[in-house]
Structures are given as C-alpha cells and as structure tokens.
Amino acid sequence: MGEGLHDRGATILQILPIFNITWEEGPFNYTTYLGIGSLGWCDTWRNPQHLIFQLANACFFISYLTPSTKKGIIFMHAVLVLGFFIFSTWAWVIVCAPDIFFWSLCYTFINICQLVFLLYQLRPVKFDPELEEAYHTLFVPFKVSRIQFKKLISNDMAQIMSLHAGEAYALQNLTRTDRLGLLLSGKLNVLCDSHFLHPILACEFLDSPEFESRANMDDKFKVSIVAATSCRYLYWQRTSLEYLFVKETYLATVMSTLIARDITTKLYAMNNKIVTEKGYHLDIRLPSITSSLTSTDHKSPTLKALKKHTSVLSGSQPNSPESVNAIEIKVEKNGLK
C-alpha cells in the first residue's frame, strides 16, 4: 500500500463490496471509496412495471416487424399510434409523469398524421365511364396506376370534346398536326380526296400517324377525319405531352408503345383495302406485289388515296420512291377494285 502511494498514477484496491481508489497529486495522496451502485450497477431491482406499460411496448415490438410495403407501412403507423397512446395513458394514470405523457402524446399525433397521409394516397381514383373504359382497355395492361393516368388526363394536360355526325376533326391540307386525339365513343371515317380509307373506333387514336411523323409546326393533315356518328374524344397538345413525358418517363414509354401499335392497326386496315378483281386480298408487305408503275392511267382513285395515306402511316414522303413502290400493285394480270 505504501509503495503504491509513491507511484505516478492511480492504484485500485478492490475491497468488496466497494472500491478503494488512491492516487497521488503533487505532495498529496487522495483516496476515495466508490460503491458498486455509483458505477452504474443496480444494487436492487424494482418490480416489473404495470401491464399497460408492457402492452405499449408490445405494440412497439409488433410495429417494427412489419414489411416495407405500402400496406406494411400503414400497419406500422397504426400500431405505433396505438402503442404511444397506451404509453401516454400509462404515464398519466400510473406513474404521473407529465414529461413522458407529453412526448408520448406528440409521437401519437405525428403517427396519426403519417397514417392519414398514407391512407389519402391510397384513396380510390375514379374516372368518368368513358375514361374508365379507355383506362382499362389501353393502360391497365401496361400496369399504369390510376394516379399516373390522372396526370395524363388532367385539365392542364387534356380536354374532352364532342363531334356531331358530319363534323370534321381534321381537314385535308388545312388542319395542323400539332395534337393527338383518342376516341372515347362513337365512330369516325378517314377520307382522302373524298375516298374512304378506314374507320376509327372507340379507344383508338385519331391521328397517331400524323402525330408520330410530324416534322415541323407547319405540317398539315393529308387526310380528312370526319365523324360518322356522335363522338367524344380526348385530345392533347403536343407541347403539353412532351412536357409531361420529360417528368413521367414510364408514361412516355407506354404512350409511344400505344401509338406504334395504333399505327400498325391502321396499316393492316389499309392493307385490307387492296383487293384484286377476283376478290383476293394482297399484302403490301410482300415484294411480289410491288411494282414500279408510274403511269397515272393505270391507277384508280382508291389506289392514289391509299398511296397518300400509307405514306403518312409509314412516316415517308408521299412522292418518294419507297412509298410508291410500297403500295403500287402490278396490274398486268390483276386489276385493283
């Protein structure tokens, strides 16, 4: 003990159940006695807390076991609301601790706000019956959510218009191709130089070829689109769609796919118009039916209209060799109706 007093540093002598600590500071020696309780250990343990306290902590335990899905997060906040409410009740009634009661009440309020916000996001988004049909037919197969579709058809993005029978959606060489229309109900006919080309039915785009192939702001429709019955259609301005597609890339991909599929459908409809005198349908994709006929004497008005509209559908110019060869038919043996 005496030798330890001359060392530079503290010497700990354990004398159960306390510690005897001695250290040297200059010419003086200091000694203190520390009990086990003063170092953080409990000499005695209290009885378990009230059942309400245990129930609150059981709620906390369950809340942290939930998965990280939307429904799991909602369940977590709901159980946390219950747990903190029970905990605040325990603090107010059992232990009478105002600070514990205050903080528990704050946590209860915060979780209630989170729960209300999450439930608001999951609210069912409903549309008009005609928009509901378009949503289920076109966008549900691509797993587009109702919230995403609502952004696409909001008042800032799109408008719903009506057409009576005989009214025109677009006039040949007059109407600019600066929009995109989707037919919700009714039927329209596509005409070129007063010749019928194909119909447009509900849940089909009105002007997908023109929208996809438009090169500048001054492009005009090369066909006329006229209502055959009373129609309702939804249309977007091109600038509005392009602005939305920058923010919603998935919607941009879905719309591009739908437009491409619609153009393909219209191409097949045009293909059905090419019929020989014997009643056989000819496929415009087959090389065997292409020719280099340039004489207008052998071309029927229907063929001229087909050539013009097919050039729009395929995205080429009407007078280019590619578009001419793609729709002109060899007529030495077969004539076109």
Image (cartoon, rainbow, N blue to C red):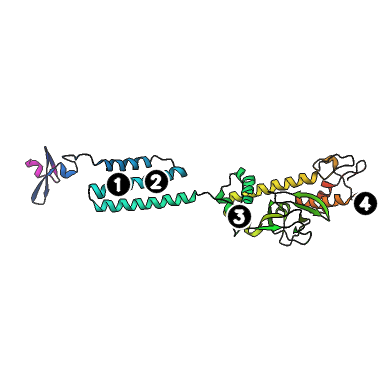
> Which contiguous range is marked in magenta?
1-11
Q: Position of residue 256 (x, y in %)?
A: 66, 49
Q: Amino acid at mark 2?
A: Ala
Q: Which of label 4 and label 3 is nearer to you?
A: 3
Residue picked out by circle 4: 297
Instruction: Work out how far the residue at label 4 is from the one at label 1, CA to CA, in angstroms.
Output: 93 Å
Tell me which label, 1 or 2, sits earlier in the chain.
Answer: 2
| Magenta segment includes 298 | no
Q: Name above or below for residue 190 compared with residue 41.
A: below
Q: Classify 174 as above or below 290.
A: below
Badge 4 vs badge 1, beta-carbon distance below 8 Å: no
Estimate the spatial distance between the alpha carbons at disc 2 and disc 4, rounded to whole Å: 79 Å
Instruction: Answer yes or no: is residue 62 visible.
Output: yes
Q: Residue tagged by mark 1?
A: 87
Q: The disc labelled 4 sits on which kind of residue?
A: Asp
Identify the amino acid type marked 3: Ile
Mark 2 vs 4, N-terminal side: 2
* Extreme residue toward the top, this view: 16
Q: Is the Cβ of the residue at disc 4 closer than 8 Å to that at disc 3?
A: no
Instruction: Kindly identify which residue carries mark 3.
Output: 153
Please name the residue shown 38% across and 50% down the image.
111
| Residue 323 as seen in the image, left or right of residue 152 | right
Residue behind mark 2: 78
* Circle 3 SS class: loop
Q: Are marks 3 and 2 in contact (CB under 8 Å)?
A: no
